Image (cartoon, coloured by chain):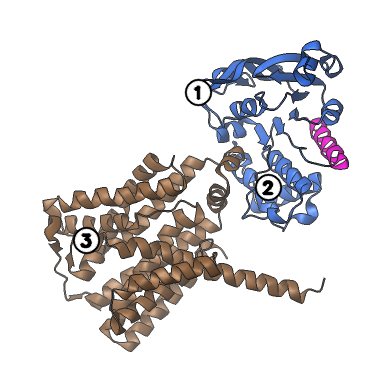
Chain colours: A blue, B brown
Amino acid sequence: MNANLLEVERLGKRFGGFVALDGIDLTVAAGERVGLIGPNGSGKSTLVNCLCGTLGNYSGAVRFEGRDVAGLTAHQRTRLGMARSFQLPRPFPSMTVTDNVRVPLLYTVNARRGARLTGEEVAARAAELLTLVGLADKAGQFPRDLTQVEMRKLELARAMAAEPKLLIADEAMAGLSHSEVEDIVALLIRLNEGGITVILIEHIMRAVMTFSQRLVVLVSGKKIADGNPNEVIRDKEVERAYLGQ
Amino acid sequence: MRWGAFFLVALAVAALIFGCALAINNDYVFFAGYTVLQFIVLATAWNILGGYTGYVNFGSAAFFAIGAYSTVFFYKFYPMPIPALILIAAAVSGLIGLGTGYLTLRLRGAFFAIATLALAVVLQTLIVNWNYVGGSRGAYIIRPSSIDYIGSYVHYLFLIMLALAVIALTIAYAIEHSALGYGFATIRDDELAAEASGVPTLKLKLIATTLSGALMGMAGAPFPYYIGYLQPSSAFGLEYAVNSIAMPIIGGTVSWAGPLVGAILLGTLQQYVTVTISSSVNVLIVGVLLVAFVVVAPNGIIGLMTSIARRGRRERKPA
């Protein structure tokens, strides 16, 4: 059995002549909390999109639980156990908060073998997830009635509803206030303690440093550092990328 | 309400309608009613793709015509009773729906709509040049004057279209109250997020195009018997494409009741205007109503009513 949940090998992605990702190697062990940082345009979101199948035609390999996921569509990867939240929340606007969470339960959990949930079970699971993220009292409302932080929580709840093994949170905290950031970090750590491997992509250093057990830095589509967060941020190259020389 | 219960209720309503029509005992009621019912089927079929998944189909007339022309084909090749012809039409237009979906569903928004419009043009050209089904001359279908058990053939056609309307509405209702309905709505809302939630968007879109196409074909299958003489320009008529879009939009696209309300309203109005003023005013009425509704009630009559009901509930509950 492979201890690494996710293995990324020499991953490359080009948009025309622009090299967005240039030979990224990355392994994530099961149960780990990994932070991923990098300046704007360094390829963080492209990496997420390649991992989750939103973007195809990349070079190199992505293995999830030892299985090469090349050619699998986004929904197939979600069903394997890779869930993501979007950088800008993308709720289903015509559905209530509960129904938003219900979708992955119907389409991911039910699609896995031997796990067809009854209507009541789906409703109970959805309520449970909303309680977990603290949206229980908003269950019947529509996404347009939510605040930014609630929208982020809905985004996470929906990702969690798919019962993932790996959760990729793409800038789940951008634009939130100090206490809201702490809220989300605490939530992510709680999810991790529940056995879910989490990759956190974030600009807010305080959040990343609290959260991460390991820190990966991307600059211009290349991985320039990977290791203990406290050592990584003192790394000369990382400093140069962020602060200039 | 389970869809089985819905089906029984719809069936009872249909029986009532047929009883009333028989009581009035005027052939015109059956003629006009047939057209309205046909539009209920077409509007409901359009809504499965256009309303639920948000893919606008401008080629409704093509699917309708496929149904009509498959009847013409079999009328000459191997005559069969109408219910059998309806099943064949469903299979043929469903398959064409599947094929069209497979070729065009990578397109979104206006591009998809234009692709379906192109489909209609291509198919019309094909039919015009296909001599066996009459080509541009058109084809005559001799309607028997009566049929066993029911009597008048017009009554029989009306009954068939009534049954199709019940089937179409039940399918729409069943979709809405199933996981499929949720899946369709996620496609309408945000396809990327839908995929990320595990929704197989391409597969669901193909289900929608196939179902929608099959139902439109079914609506078209009895048409040659109704009209007696079928020519390409009437089967591919602009009114089918326009009406099957306008009716759901005016009625409301998110629920099965929308196309039903829209089709009854617009269909009846058109029949009335055809008799009192002129049939060419029809298209004008559709246009004016469509613009009015897009401005005043973008969610249609059903949407307008639910928002009024919701506001009423909020006012009754003091803050």
Residue topped by disc 1: A16
On the image, the x and y values in percent for residue A174 come to 76, 37
Task: Determine the residue positioned at 35% across, 58% down.
Answer: B216
Q: Is residue B23 visible?
A: yes
Magenta segment includes A178:
yes
On the image, the x and y values in percent for residue A16 come to 50, 23
Both marks 2 and 3 on one chain: no
Magenta segment includes B307:
no
Check the picture and name the quadrant holding the C terminus of chain B.
Answer: bottom right
* Residue type at numbered disc 3: Ser
Q: Of helix, strand and loop, which one carries label 1?
A: loop
Q: Which residues are magenta?
A: A177-196
Tag 3–tag 1 contact (CB < 8 Å): no
Disc with the residue nearer the chain's start (1 vs 2) = 1
Residue topped by disc 2: A101
Nearest the eye: B67 or B118: B118
Residue topped by disc 3: B233
On the image, the x and y values in percent for residue A224 come to 72, 14
Task: Determine the residue positioned at 35% across, 49% down.
Answer: B116
Q: Of helix, strand and loop, which one carries label 2?
A: helix
Both marks 1 and 2 on one chain: yes
* Residue type at numbered disc 1: Gly
**In-image side of B162 versus B147 (left or right):** right
Read off the chain for label 1: A
Task: Determine the residue positioned at 13% across, 55% down.
Answer: B135
